Amino acid sequence: MSIFIPKFADRVYFVNWEGNIVNYVICNSEQSTHLIKSGKCFRTEEDAVRARNRSYANRELEVLADELNGRVDIDWEDLDQEKFFIEYNYAIKCFEYYSTGGHWRGETTYCLDYNFLEVALEKLGENKLRLILEVE
């Protein structure tokens, strides 16, 4: 999904704090300024729904990782602690897991359990993982 920066009088959609999709016209207001700066404006209702569903699915993955970690925090200072994460390999068209010691990438969910991918596929399903990783 490409970044959308609305202009004055553009009709946009956004997800409010309750998870509802709101239809809104950009105007000269504090709310409009906040929406534009937050990057949470969408061209279509479908884009907003997809973003909301992606956010919910990502939260499910984070909760699963936390459960699998036994509520143990990931220690980014400990380079010997393996941290597993899930990616999609487009070359062979499947999900794979990778591990790292100390590199952290934004918007990636990490887990200390070697079986993270297997459990995520079982609990969340392939469609949610595709949504999280934005696999078309």
Image: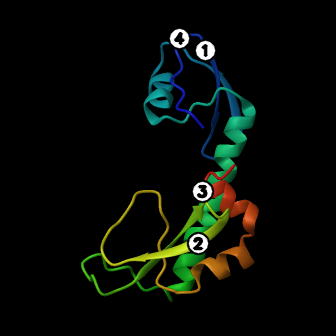
Q: Residue at x 47, y 62 (%)?
A: 108
Query: Given this view, does label 2 or label 1 mark the residue nearer the observer?
Result: 2
Q: Badge 1: few (under 14), some or many (20 or more) residues near its Cα, within 10 Å?
A: few
- Dot 1 falls on a residue whose secondary structure is loop
Q: Taking 82 as reference, is 97 left or right?
A: right
- Nearer the observer, 133 or 24: 133
What amino acid is found at the position of numbered circle 3 in the picture?
Answer: Leu
Q: Residue at x 32, y 68 (%)?
A: 103
- Nearer the observer, 128 or 59: 128
Mark drawn on residue 46: none
Q: Which residue is mark 2?
A: 96
Q: Which residue is mark 3?
A: 133
Query: Given this view, does label 3 or label 4 mark the residue nearer the observer?
Result: 3
- Dot 2 falls on a residue whose secondary structure is strand
Mark drawn on residue 8: 4
Looking at the image, do the residues carrying marks 3 and 1 touch, with CB atoms under 8 Å apart?
Answer: no
Q: How far apart, in angstroms, are the residues tagged by discs 2 and 4?
A: 43 Å
Q: Which residue is mark 1?
A: 10
Q: Residue at x 39, y 81 (%)?
A: 73
Q: Is residue 95 positioned above or below 78 on the image?
A: above
- Nearer the observer, 2 or 11: 2
What amino acid is found at the position of numbered circle 4 in the picture?
Answer: Phe
Q: How far apart, in angstroms, are the residues tagged by discs 2 and 3?
A: 12 Å
Q: Residue at x 52, y 79 (%)?
A: 66
